[in-house]
Image: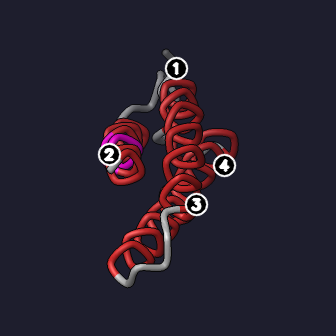
Amino acid sequence: MVGAISVAVMAAAFEAALGFAKSDTRGGAEPIFGRQSVADLLMGVKMRIDASRFLTWKACHALDNGLGGELALEAKIYCSELAVKSVTDCAFAVGM
């Protein structure tokens, strides 16, 4: 459950930051998404979301098939830690 909630939080932060980065120019000629530093931050967040989503799916599959809860514990710790880093990176990307 914690893994799935973490994925949802990361995805919401990513979508908000991506929308902002594509629309705001910060006084320049093009949106800030065109800057490499912002694009790199957001790409890192996207990769963390995908990795967390797949680990959570695998943990759910393991629990459904009686393969133990070790993957569920891994998903809980891994995804919750990445959620904190991802939300922080999204805030940095939009300049907060």
> Mark 4 and mark 2 in contact (Cβ < 8 Å)?
no
| Residue under numbered circle 3 | 47
68 vs 89, nearest the viewer: 68
Callout 1 amino acid = Gly
Residue 63 appears at what percent x and percent y?
Answer: 39, 72
Residue 59 appears at what percent x and percent y?
Answer: 46, 69
> Mark 1 and mark 4 in contact (Cβ < 8 Å)?
no
Bin the neighbour count of mark 3 within 10 Å (Cα to Cα): few under 14, some 14-19, many 20 and up: few
Confirm whether the magenta stretch covers residue 89: no
Callout 2 amino acid = Ile
Residue 5 badge: 2
| Residue under numbered circle 4 | 40
Residue depth check, mark 3 versus mark 4: number of the one nearer the observer: 3
53 vs 94, nearest the viewer: 53
74 vs 29, nearest the viewer: 74
Residue depth check, mark 3 versus mark 1: number of the one nearer the observer: 3
Callout 4 amino acid = Asp
Label 3 – label 2 distance at C-alpha? 17 Å
Looking at the image, which residue is at 44% across and 77% down? 62
Callout 3 amino acid = Met
Looking at the image, which residue is at 40% across and 44% down? 6
- Residue 17 lies left or right of residue 39; in this view the side is left
The numbered mark, 3 or 4, whose residue comes first in the sequence reads 4
Label 3 – label 1 distance at C-alpha? 21 Å
- Residue 12 lies left or right of residue 34; in this view the side is left
Residue 42 drawn above or below residue 92: below
Residue span colored magenta: 8-12
